[in-house]
Amino acid sequence: MARARKIVAAYDAAGGNVANVDGQMIDVPIHRSAQRVLQRARQ
């Protein structure tokens, strides 16, 4: 959960461009995956 939140926050802060979280490139597929994790947690 914490990592998914961090990924979504970094990607959003980058304005939808590629972001970097703990040395990992965050692009659209990873961002979408993190969003799904957060969405499932809310259910």
Image (cartoon, rainbow, N blue to C red):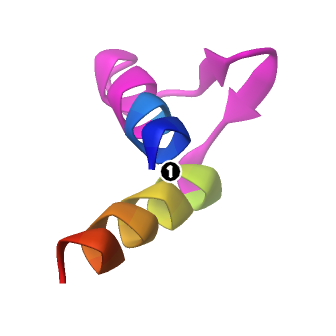
Q: Quadrant of the C terminus?
A: bottom left
| Amino acid at the residue labelled 1 | His
Q: Does residue 14 lie above or below 8 as drawn?
A: above
Q: Which residue is mark 1?
A: 31
Q: Which residues are magenta?
A: 8-28
Give the percent coordinates (x, y) of residue 35.
37, 60
Horizontal side of 22 relative to 37 (left or right) equals right
Which quarter of the figure has residue 10? top left
| 16 vs 24, nearest the viewer | 24
> In the orientation shown, which residue stands out farthest toward the bottom?
43
Q: Is residue 27 left or right of residue 42?
A: right
Position of residue 5 relative to residue 29, above or below, is: above
Residue 12: where, in percent of width, then height? 31, 29
Q: Is residue 17 magenta?
A: yes
Considering every residue shown, the one lying at the far left of the view is 43
In screen coordinates, is 3 left or right of 41? Answer: right
Residue that appears at 44% across and 67% down: 37
4 to 32, vertically: above or below: above
Q: Residue at x 45, y 29 (%)?
A: 6
Q: How many marks?
A: 1
- Asked where in the image residue 18 lies, by quadrant, the reply is top right
Question: Circle 1 — which element?
Answer: helix
Label 1: few (<14), some (14–19) or many (≥20) C-alpha neighbours in 10 Å? many
Give the residue drawn at x 54%, y 65%. 33
